[in-house]
Image: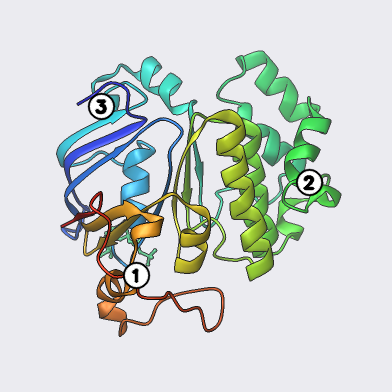
Amino acid sequence: MNAEAALALEDVGLVHANGQRALRGVTLRVAPGARVAVIGPSGAGKTSLLRIAATALRPDEGRIELLGARPWQLRARALKALRARIGMIHQAPPIPPRLRVITAVLAGRLGAWSGGRALASLLVPADIAGAQAALARLDLADRLFDRCDRLSGGQLQRVGMARVLYQAPELLLADEPVSALDPALADLAVGELIAQSQATGATLIASLHAVDLALKWFDRIVGLRAGVVVFDAPAAAISRGMLQELYATEGSLLPTQTPGFELEERGAPAPTVVCR
Ligand SMILES: Nc1ncnc2c1ncn2[C@@H]1O[C@H](COP(=O)(O)OP(=O)(O)OP(=O)(O)O)[C@@H](O)[C@H]1O
C-alpha cells in the first residue's frame, strides 16, 4: 500500500462477535484532503467501516493503513498518538449527560493536550472563545454553558460535531452526523464539515442517509450494500440506475431529505467509475 493515503483498506472483512458479517473484501483508498461520502441501505456496513477507520474495531481480514501507519502493529502509546489525529462524529455522541456544552467541546483537544492542561480545562474551561466559535458554526453559540442533558437530540448531535471541529483532526470521520437535524440545519452542518476539510486540509469520510446531501457536497461517493463496495465514483458520475440498484432492498426508494428529489438519468458512467 502507498504510504501517502489518509486511509487505505485492502480486502478488509469484518465479522461481529455474534457471527454477523458486516464487511467483505472492502478495498478503498482515500487520499489526504479528499472528501468521500459513504451511502447505502440500512445494515450495509457504513458504521462498521467508519469504526474500522477510527480504529474502534479491528478488521478480521485484510489490511488497514491510516495516516501513513498500520494501526494494529503499533504499540499502545503510538496508537494513542495516531488516534489523537483522528476525529469521529457519532450519530449519537457519547457525551456524559451532566457535562456542560463548553466542556464537551473542549474535550475535543484532550488527546492533544498534556495531562495537566487537560485536567485544568475540565475544572476551568481554557478556551471559551474557541469553543464558542466552533458552536457558532453550527448555530449553537448561545448554549455554551448549558448542561448537555438539557439539549435536544439535534442540539446534542451538533455539540458532538462542534467538538470534532474544535479538535481539528487530520482525518475527520462522521457516522450519519446529521440524522437528527432538519434539512436546513443538516445542509448547514454538512457544509461546515466540508469547509473544515477545505480550510485545514483534513480528509473527510462521512456516511450519510440522505443521498441528495451526499451528491450536493461530496466529490466522491462510495456505495455500500451488504458489506460490499458496489460502486466508488465521482459524484458527477452517479446515475439514477446506480442508486436504484444500491437501494433495491428498500424498494429502490432513494432516501433523501428533499421531498421529490429526482436525479436525472446521466447515461453511461464516466470511465473512472469502479463498479463491483
Ligand atoms: N455490535 C454489533 N454486533 C453484531 N452485529 C452488528 C453489530 N453492529 C452491526 N452489526 C451488523 O453488521 C451489519 C452492518 O451494520 P452497520 O451498523 O455497520 O450498518 P449501517 O450501514 O451503518 O446501518 P444503518 O444505516 O442502519 O446504521 C448489520 O448486519 C448489523 O446487523
Q: Where is residue 15 in the image (x, y as percent from the top left)?
A: 18, 52
Mark found first going from the N terminus, 2 or 3? 3
Instruction: Using residue 184 as the reference point, say whether residue 72 is left or right of it.
Output: left
Mark 1 vs mark 2: give the one in front.
1
Q: Residues within 10 Å of mark 1 (few under 14, many from 20)?
A: few
Of residues 132 and 246, the one nearer the viewer is 246
Mark found first going from the N terminus, 3 or 1? 3
Kind of residue at badge 3: Trp
Q: Position of residue 174 (x, y in %)?
A: 48, 48
**Which labelled disc corresponds to residue 136?**
2
Residue located at (39% from left, 38% from top): 54
Secondary structure at badge 1 equals loop
Kind of residue at badge 2: Ala
Of residues 243 and 264, the one nearer the viewer is 264
Q: In which quarter of the image is the C terminus?
A: bottom left
Q: Does the Cβ of the disc 2 residue fall within 8 Å of ligand 1?
A: no
| Residues under numbered marks 3 and 1 in contact, where contact means CB atoms less than 8 Å apart | no
Mark 3 vs mark 1: give the one in front.
1
Mark found first going from the N terminus, 1 or 2? 2
Q: Does residue 100 appear anywhere in the picture?
A: no
The residue tagged 3 is 72
Kind of residue at badge 1: Arg
The quadrant where ligand 1 appears is bottom left
Of residues 202 and 12, the one nearer the viewer is 202
Q: In which quarter of the image is residue 75?
A: top left
Q: Position of residue 72 (x, y in %)?
A: 25, 27
Q: Residues within 10 Å of mark 3 (few under 14, many from 20)?
A: some
Give the vertical position of 269 relative to 262 (above or below). Answer: above
Residue located at (76% from left, 59% from top): 150
The residue tagged 1 is 266
